[in-house]
Amino acid sequence: MSIVLDHVNYTYSAGTAYEKHALKDINLVIPDGQFIGLIGHTGSGKSTLIQHLNGLIKATGGAIYYDGHDIYDDDFSKKELRTKVGLVFQYPEHQLFETTVVKDVEFGPKNMKLPQLEVQMRTFEAIKMVGISEELYDASPFELSGGQKRRVAIAGVLAMKPEVLVLDEPTAGLDPMGRDEILDQIAAIQKERGITVILVSHSMEDVAKYVERLIVMDHGSVQYDGTPKEVFSHYKELEAMGLAAPQVTYVMENLKAQGMNVGDATTVEEAKNEILRAWKKI
Amino acid sequence: MIRDITIGQYYPADSVLHRLDPRVKLVGTLTFLISLFLFNNLIGYVIAGLFLATMIKISKVPFSFIVRGLKTIVILMLFTVVFNLFLTDGTVLWQWKFIKITIEGIQTAIFMALRLTFLIIGSSLMTLTTTPNQLTDGLETGLAPLKKLHFPVHEISMMMSIALRFIPILLEETDKIMKAQQARGADFEEGKLMERVKALVPMLVPLFVSAFHRANDLAMAMEARCYRGGEGRTRMKPLKYSKRDGMAYLCLVAYLVVLVATTRLWMLFVA
């Protein structure tokens, strides 16, 4: 369901020496089923922003509407909102606590007070989705490898069947293969369930490859909001913010400078096609 | 919510109190805390209050910030006040069956509340103006003579500095884990007592796991840098007394003299 952020402001520890204006006048419309990327350097307000989406942090100014309802209304259930907007924190494996993988994933659906059968179905479906093999179902989550722990933690949120899935750097600290696998699985889930996915990432390659819309944050406000291609065409401004464009974008820029007749590209696939097209013309 | 706990927190500012040698502040705070038990009449509280108010003013720490630290002891304070109010013998002011309030009770209740407030504010003023590192440095240097008695001064101050250093980290961690579990539908605020206690498990388990991890990592990092206890260890910033510190000690002595003299005289002539 759609989320609308209307002039959202947030100040940390207002009135103390640690006061920090973390979000400045954020206006966003997040429609159904979009795959959105959220980038920005450390401390730009990304994490603060996504915690607003499920009501974990209350904005100090402005309003947020979920599916047309003001989430700060007294009769709006935050608990229900949190089951609809699933938030996977950075390093989510730090939240594992149960004795077995299955029990841990069950935590979310159980809190939703679903019938036992439904809880189990959702649990097994979610574990399967993230690619955890059956022999690990009854293992202690603390015995798993880092990548497996991460998957279990993501499954814990997926099992609640959220309509919006927000992931804060789900691939931080993973090896390249684990990273691609997790992102592929998320993309597949997004397609399969038709849910909205918001992916916070530091990897320009990743967002270029997966997302259809890219939001760039800098110093607590939204700087760019558009398709990856549009956003990455501002690569010079992005660099000034401590960000960058994907490597291939630079390759293409250099080729253009060398006089080759190629267009813009943000993924290796696109670049390949562009170069081949240019070659064939010659 | 968790950010609001101010006990043991440092408040960065540029004031005389911040620049004082930590030993002075340690001795000063200890003296102030002890001085609160040297009297039991109004004038004593006025003098101690004035002294504390001056220190707060000098420290440049906003008063609202200091008061926030008191929130954590509200319950303790209530207990003390209620017990003193109802259980002190003396001239009865109001009675209902076996419950009675006496003039002495009211007086002790107010005095106890004041004393507790002063104790907390006094000690939080020290932590607010001294970084944990300075504090343990001060402690270690101040207690150095005890080494002759085979008292593990360095080890204790090292443990203290690590513990203090970990307070904000663990608080932040708690906040993060709480949020992560809330995002999975955990409820820490509602429910019966047993349910609430049970709700703590998903928070405490990850917290302990991460605390042990951190302790392990820290021990490893210390060993990697060849830490082997306090023997022969020198400091980057050795503590040195300056003129300012001498003045501070003088002020402290002056405060004590004034306090003791006035309260004794008050007892002699007024009471």
Image (tube, coloured by chain):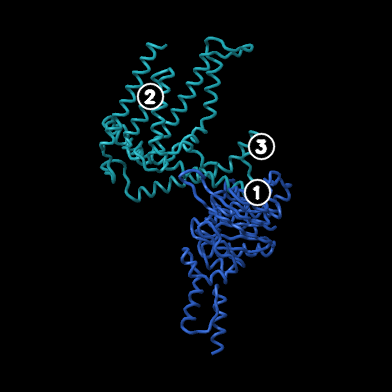
Q: Position of residue A145 (x, y in %)?
A: 53, 55
Quarter of the figure that contains the N terminus of chain B = top right
Chain appearing in blue on the rendered image? A
Residue A130 is left or right of residue B144, and the answer is right
Nearest to viewer (mark 1 / mark 3)? 3
Q: Residue at x 35, y 51 (%)?
A: B224
In the rendered structure, are the residues bearing label 1 and label 2 in contact, judged by CB atoms less than 8 Å apart? no
Name which quarter of the figure residue A136 lies in: bottom right
Residue A108: image tag: 1
What residue would you read off at disc 2? B34
Helix, strand, or loop for circle 2? helix
The image shows residue A255, relative to residue B143, as above or below, that is: below
Name which quarter of the figure residue A267 lies in: bottom right
Crowding around mark 1 (Cα neighbors within 10 Å: few <14, some 14 to 19, many 20+) is: many
Which chain letter goes with mark 1? A
What residue would you read off at disc 3? B191
State how far apart marks 1 and 2 are (Cα): 52 Å
The image shows residue B58, relative to residue B97, as above or below, that is: below
Helix, strand, or loop for circle 3? loop
In the rendered structure, are the residues bearing label 2 and label 3 in contact, judged by CB atoms less than 8 Å apart? no
Chain appearing in cyan on the rendered image? B
Q: Position of residue A200 (x, y in %)?
A: 56, 59
Sequence-first disc among 2 and 3: 2
Q: Residue furthest top?
A: B91
The image shows residue A111, relative to residue A224, as above or below, that is: above
Q: Position of residue A56 (x, y in %)?
A: 60, 48
- The three-letter code of the residue at mark 1 reads Gly
Q: Which residue occupies the foreground of this view, B117 or A24?
A: A24
Crowding around mark 2 (Cα neighbors within 10 Å: few <14, some 14 to 19, many 20+) is: few
The reply to the same-chain question for discs 2 and 3 is: yes
Residue A268 is left or right of residue B55, and the answer is right
Nearest to viewer (mark 2 / mark 3)? 2
